[in-house]
Image (cartoon, rainbow, N blue to C red):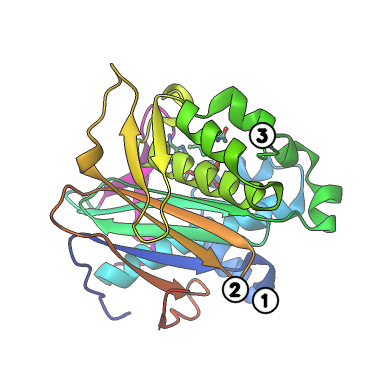
């Protein structure tokens, strides 16, 4: 049995795996054995093998990661989804661990908290040529440029982007995108929350902060955010419902699910 990890209130543990490095047939068979019949059917609906593989790794990741905190058998977790699709632990009943998953080409991440709403989003900053070839459907959903921001983002975010020199714009666009996505994922309500109902403010010396448009539901003091650049090419954003004065702290760990838990890494 794995050693149970402690998880402090106000902390987000961010675990990540690199699916393309996990190719051992025996390991993949262990991952497949963890899938429920519904998950097996879901995985078969992906047209591309690479998407099936990423799905398999994230299912194994969430099970292995949660078990690292409790010592439970990774196969014993039962999940349910809320009406907007957000998964949460259904069994064992009464479990306080919460998690959220995100993935992009080459990376899957799982953010874990103790009893706090959490959302995570990851985007690859640059598309690789292989992604362009293999993932046309995915690409249609990818953020592209200022036009997307003008259509969906809050006025203050659009103004920030318009003020930036062009070479900085793409990076900041991805920061807004991932932060906004992390927030709606923490709320668990998907795109039923209009993306211009709330705005993120970026600052050199403080974590990102949220504000809400007049008449929109939300308390800025309830939410904290963190941003991490992983492996030089992935932008990760985390949102947690954590009212002050507690401060969000983040730990980072690379893992190969069920094989190696990895070590806590210094935040880049
Ligand atoms: C489904 C959604 C929550 C995230 O989608 P996404 O960014 O394409 O995908 P990610 O890889 O970040 O996250 C997918 C995972 O989020 C989790 N998820 C699904 N629905 C969720 C919800 N309502 N809330 C939180 N998490 C959710 C699931 O674990 C899912 O993986 P799984 O199906 O394998 O379990 C939703 O926000 C969406 O459709 N976004 C589309 C992208 C977009 O337009 N973003 C605008 C940002 S500016």
Q: Nearer the viewer, mark 3 or mark 1?
A: 3
- The residue tagged 2 is 27
* Front residue of 78 and 165: 165
Label 1 close to label 2 by CB (< 8 Å)? yes
Quadrant of residue 26 in the image? bottom right
Horizontal arrangement in the rendering, residue 245 relative to residue 52 (left or right): left
Q: Nearer the viewer, mark 3 or mark 2?
A: 3
* Front residue of 244 and 42: 244
* Structural distance between the alpha carbons of marks 1 and 2: 5 Å
Q: Residues within 10 Å of mark 3 (few under 14, many from 20)?
A: some
Where disc 3 sits, the SS reads helix
- The residue tagged 1 is 24
* Residue span colored magenta: 72-91
- The residue tagged 3 is 146
Q: Residues within 10 Å of mark 2 (few under 14, many from 20)?
A: some
* Front residue of 268 and 51: 268
């Amino acid at each position: 049995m794995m050693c149970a990890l402690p998880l402090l209130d106000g902390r987000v543990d961010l675990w990540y795996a690199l699916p393309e490095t996990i190719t051992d047939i025996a390991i993949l068979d262990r991952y497949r054995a963890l899938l429920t019949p519904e998950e097996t059917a879901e995985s078969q609906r992906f047209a591309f093998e690479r998407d099936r593989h990423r799905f398999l790794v994230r299912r194994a990741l969430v099970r292995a990661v949660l078990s690292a905190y409790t010592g439970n058998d990774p196969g014993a977790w039962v999940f349910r989804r809320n009406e907007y699709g957000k998964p949460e632990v259904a069994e064992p009943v009464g479990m306080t661990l919460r998690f959220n998953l995100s993935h992009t080409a080459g990376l899957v991440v799982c953010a874990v908290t103790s009893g706090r709403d959490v959302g995570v989003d990851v985007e690859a900053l640059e598309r690789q040529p292989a992604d362009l070839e293999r993932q046309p459907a995915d690409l249609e959903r990818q953020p592209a440029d200022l036009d997307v921001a003008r259509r969906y983002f809050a006025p203050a975010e659009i103004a920030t982007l318009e003020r930036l020199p062009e070479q900085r714009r793409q990076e900041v666009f991805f920061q807004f995108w991932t932060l906004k996505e992390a927030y709606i994922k923490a709320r668990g309500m998907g795109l039923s929350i209009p993306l211009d109902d709330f705005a993120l403010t970026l600052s050199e010396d403080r974590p990102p902060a949220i504000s809400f448009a007049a008449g929109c539901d939300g308390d800025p003091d309830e939410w904290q955010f963190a941003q991490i650049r992983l492996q030089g090419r992935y932008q990760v954003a985390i949102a947690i419902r954590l009212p002050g004065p507690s401060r969000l702290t983040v730990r980072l760990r690379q893992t190969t699910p069920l094989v190696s838990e990895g070590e806590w890494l210094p935040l880049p």
